[in-house]
Image: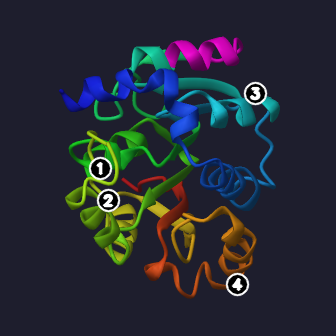
Amino acid sequence: MDKEIFYNSIADDFDSIMNMYDTNRRIEVIFDDFLGSENLKDKRLLDAGCGTGLFTKKALEREANVTSIDIAPKLVELTKKKNPATNAIEASVLNLPFDDNTFDYVISSDVIEHTPNPYDATKELIRVLKPGGKICITVPNRSFWYFSVVIANFLKIRDYQGFENWVHFKEFRKFLIQNNIQIETYKGIHLFPFVFSFLNPILYKLDRITDKRLGILMVNIAAHGTKKTKTP
């Protein structure tokens, strides 16, 4: 199966496939930790890789003017059905159908790794962000826990056929800076994988203590930055 088609094939089961502890944790990081003090009312916000619209829903609750995009037509349809107020569009994060400097905010949570090139996808997200605008990205961290994916795939424990191009903790931070992003917060999420639900309360407490100091060892990277105004 073509990897792009795969995402459309799992759309009907998308929410059940997702780990909701992880999803809710990423929503909390983006909308509370990163954007908690921001007034999003009437601001143009791009939810890049919207899935079934859970991040879009949160942005609409904050009264943002939301555009939601995903490569899978069924996911776009589901997002629009759940969130009629959003402008939902089928599009790839590698080729966004928007002009430069369009959005006040760009959020993308665990999406760029599902493309052939997460760095090219990030460049596109930065391109459509206005100077002075805020970008929030989460992405799995290749620096430590990637071995678990390799083992799971080798043992055929999971049936996943999409891209899994995780990025390295230090390399991704350097990349953002090189591409005109002033880092506001850069940290980790999940000190260990969220496999056993009874351990999630412990995991949450550890995250709050170690997210910056041990970020390089954590499962996910969470980045929050501002697009700088380039000087002539």
> Residue at 48% across / 52% down in the picture?
229
Q: Is residue 71 visible?
A: no
The number of numbered discs placed on residues in the rendered structure image is: 4
Q: Are marks 2 and 1 in contact (CB under 8 Å)?
A: yes
- Kindly identify the amino acid type of the residue bearing the numbered disc 1: Pro
Q: Residue tagged by mark 3? A: 42
Q: Residue tagged by mark 4? A: 209
Q: Are marks 3 and 4 in contact (CB under 8 Å)?
A: no
Disc 2 versus disc 4: distance between alpha carbons? 24 Å
- Residue 28: horizontal and vertical position, in percent? 72, 54
Q: Which quarter of the picture shows residue 142?
A: bottom left
Pair 1/3: label in front: 1
Magenta stretch containing residue 81, yes or no? Answer: yes
Which circle's residue, 3 or 2, is located before the other in the chain?
3
- Residue 228: horizontal and vertical position, in percent? 49, 56
Magenta stretch containing residue 55, yes or no? Answer: no
Dot 4: within a 10 Å radius of its alpha carbon, few (fewer than 14), some, or many (20 or more) residues? few
- Kindly identify the amino acid type of the residue bearing the numbered disc 4: Ile
Q: Which quarter of the picture shows residue 68?
A: top right
- Secondary structure beneath dot 1 equals helix
- Kindly identify the amino acid type of the residue bearing the numbered disc 3: Asp
Marking on residue 118: 1
Magenta region, residue range: 76-86
Which circle's residue, 2 or 4, is located before the other in the chain?
2
Disc 4 versus disc 1: distance between alpha carbons? 28 Å
Pair 2/1: label in front: 2
- Kindly identify the amino acid type of the residue bearing the numbered disc 2: Trp
Which circle's residue, 1 or 3, is located before the other in the chain?
3
- Secondary structure beneath dot 2 equals loop
Disc 1 versus disc 3: distance between alpha carbons? 29 Å
